[in-house]
Image: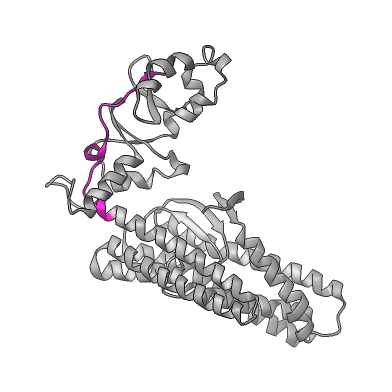
């Protein structure tokens, strides 16, 4: 997600944090320390309220991590790859591969809200127990607050609108009933668009009436609208690519160059004559060894272009997205995200380059599909 930074790992999965997550936590902690705790447990010092609000905020952050960890653990247990976890305004988002079945998609979707509801129940129960044993105090109030926050998070995430978990549940159910995953994804994305617009309208109406929190509601709605739009577009691309294989979409022939050439010579002999901004490289045996981008070549100072070899500024094959010509392009693109090599896709047969699939090639297929022109061969069948 744009606007997020990597902050560590959770269960071996990269953990990222969107700027909206700490803002939300700060707002909630401020409300807890300045309004909720003084109203529930009056008579304490400002320091007590401040410390309690920080602890409550950290506990809430931990519960958000557990929510997303539940998604990641369930997905991995069902054989779905997990790329990263991002905490943001609505809790979090787990970037993962596409589940193989509707049942797996449903289990992965429901695991997060169930975890939040369980944490909420335990926290509320612990708060009631603390009250019974030691009397109503700040610890009991923080636990009750944490419990209700998690219960609210769990219920809110079950609303039937992508990218909320409830939208994933709707998507899984529609997929199971219709057998069409892409249609189910488009429907879930549409519900997310509608819900996002409603939140924006509600937030703006509240803000105009003088409620400052309305601005935050509108911002959350905007996030939902943007992500839901992206998911609908992705589903549309998957539909357009249904049955299309990498060999059907690739550009061929394509300009290549030897990876041992000096950067200056490579620019003159290969880059200057290529119509692509990313060019495949070949080793001494004529096998693909990686790709090099124009911007990487441009970053080499002019005085060093005859000293540095092009392979020194290239992306090695191990970090590229590689496919065979008969692989379904939709499945290949699942591996072609930035963290897994990105574009272009190198179409390779026994180490030898057959062609490349660029983002332009994918965009062209999508545009042809919108015109009613199919590029899939007659014998190809959807997966």
246, above or below 202, in the image: above
Residue beneath the point at 31% across and 46% down: 363
Q: Residue at x 44, y 73 (%)?
A: 195
Q: Quadrant of residue 169?
A: bottom left
Residue 370 visible here: yes
Residue 29 place in picture, x, y as percent: 72, 70
The segment highlighted magenta reads: 239-259
User: What is the x, y in percent for residue 83?
Assistant: 48, 49
Give the quadrant of residue 370.
bottom left
Question: Is residue 99 among the parts visible in the rendering?
Answer: no
Q: Residue furthest front?
A: 208
Vertical relation: 93 (above or below) 350: below
Query: 17 or 108: nearer the eye?
Result: 17
Identify the residue at the far top of this view: 306
In the image, taking residue 138 as reference, residue 100 lies left or right, namely left
In this rendered view, identify the residue nearer to me: 187 or 95: 187
- Name the dominant secondary structure of the magenta segment: loop
Give the residue furthest to the left.
Answer: 378
At 20% from the left edge and 53% from the top edge, which residue is drawn? 371
Above or below, 176 against 43 in this view is above
Q: How is the image coloured?
A: one colour
**In this rendering, is residue 268 above or below 153?**
above
**Residue 240 point in image, percent of width and height:** 25, 52
Q: Residue at x 39, y 59 (%)?
A: 231
The answer to whether residue 294 is magenta is: no
Picture mark count: 0
Quarter where residue 205 is shown:
bottom right
Residue 50 is situated, as x and y percent measured from the top left of the image, at: 80, 71
**Is residue 242 magenta-colored?**
yes
- 363 with respect to 59 (left or right): left
């Amino acid at each position: 997600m744009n606007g997020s930074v990597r902050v560590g790992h959770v269960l071996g999965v990269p953990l990222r944090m969107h700027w909206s997550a700490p803002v939300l936590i700060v707002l909630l902690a401020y409300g807890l320390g300045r309004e909720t705790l003084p109203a529930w447990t009056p008579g304490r010092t400002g320091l007590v309220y401040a410390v309690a609000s920080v602890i409550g905020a950290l506990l809430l952050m931990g519960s958000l991590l557990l929510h997303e960890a539940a998604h990641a653990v369930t997905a991995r247990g069902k054989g779905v790859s997990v790329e990263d976890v991002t905490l943001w305004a609505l809790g979090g988002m787990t970037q993962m591969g596409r589940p193989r079945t509707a049942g797996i998609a449903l289990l992965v979707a429901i695991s997060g809200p169930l975890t939040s509801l369980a944490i909420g129940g335990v926290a509320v129960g612990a708060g009631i127990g603390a009250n019974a044993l030691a009397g109503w105090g700040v610890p009991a109030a923080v636990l009750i607050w944490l419990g209700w926050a998690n219960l609210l998070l769990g219920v809110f995430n079950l609303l039937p609108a992508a990218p909320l978990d409830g939208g994933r549940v709707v998507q899984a159910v529609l997929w199971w009933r219709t057998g069409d995953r892409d249609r189910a994804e488009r429907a879930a994305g549409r519900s997310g668009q509608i819900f996002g617009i409603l939140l924006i309208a509600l937030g703006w109406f509240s803000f105009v009436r003088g409620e400052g929190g309305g601005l935050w509601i509108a911002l959350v709605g905007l996030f939902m609208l943007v992500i839901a739009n992206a998911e609908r577009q992705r589903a549309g691309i998957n539909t357009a690519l249904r049955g299309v294989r990498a060999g059907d979409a690739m550009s061929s022939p394509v300009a290549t160059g030897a990876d041992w050439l000096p950067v200056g010579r490579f620019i003159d002999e290969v880059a200057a004559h290529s119509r692509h901004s990313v060019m495949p490289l070949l080793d001494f045996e004529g096998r693909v060894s990686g790709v090099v981008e124009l911007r990487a070549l441009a970053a080499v100072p002019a005085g060093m272009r005859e000293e540095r070899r092009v392979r020194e500024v290239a992306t090695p094959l191990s970090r590229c997205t590689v496919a065979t010509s008969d692989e379904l392009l939709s499945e290949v693109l699942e591996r072609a995200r930035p963290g897994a090599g990105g574009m272009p896709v190198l179409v390779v047969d026994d180490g030898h380059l057959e062609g490349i699939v660029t983002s332009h090639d994918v965009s062209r297929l999508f545009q042809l599909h919108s015109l009613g022109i199919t590029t899939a061969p007659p014998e190809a069948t959807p997966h």
